[in-house]
Image (spheres, grey):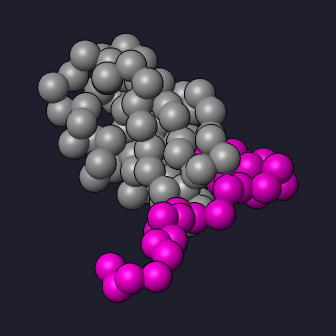
Amino acid sequence: MPQGEVSNTNEHMPEPLLPQELLDCTQRVQEALADLRPFLEADGGDITLEEITAEGVARVRLHGACSSCSMSPMTMRAGVQEAVKRMAPRIVRVEAVNV
């Protein structure tokens, strides 16, 4: 970095979600999970939303067969995270709290 230049460490960090944005994201994430639920239930599992952080991280809990399935990480990335981010673009990532 050139001398005298100040680094902006937050340049890649999205602005924190405002309370109304959190409510909107929560509703949209719940809708995305509802759309996915039949596929998870068909394999003996389920998913619930635990929280959405101000930073835009959706934390979910996997239930039943999903909580111990070896395919859960792939399901989270390819299925859940993509569906959630499509419905709620302000969500930056989805994390399972129990995997």
Q: Residue furthest front?
A: 3
Residue under the point 44% across and 51% down: 93
Q: Is residue 23 magenta?
A: yes
Task: Classify 84 as above or below 34.
Answer: below
Residue under the point 62% across and 33% down: 51
Q: Position of residue 75 (x, y in %)?
A: 27, 41
Residues 94 and 40: in front is 94
Residues 99 and 10: in front is 10
Instruction: Tell me if 90 is positioned left or right of 94 in this view.
Output: right
- Residue 86 seen in the current view: no
Q: Main secondary structure of the magenta part?
A: loop
Q: Position of residue 89 (x, y in %)?
A: 56, 65
Residue under the point 79% across and 55% down: 18
- Write down the region rendered in magenta: 1-29
Q: Is residue 78 magenta?
A: no
Task: Classify 65 as above or below 30.
Answer: above
Quarter of the picture containing the C terminus is: top left
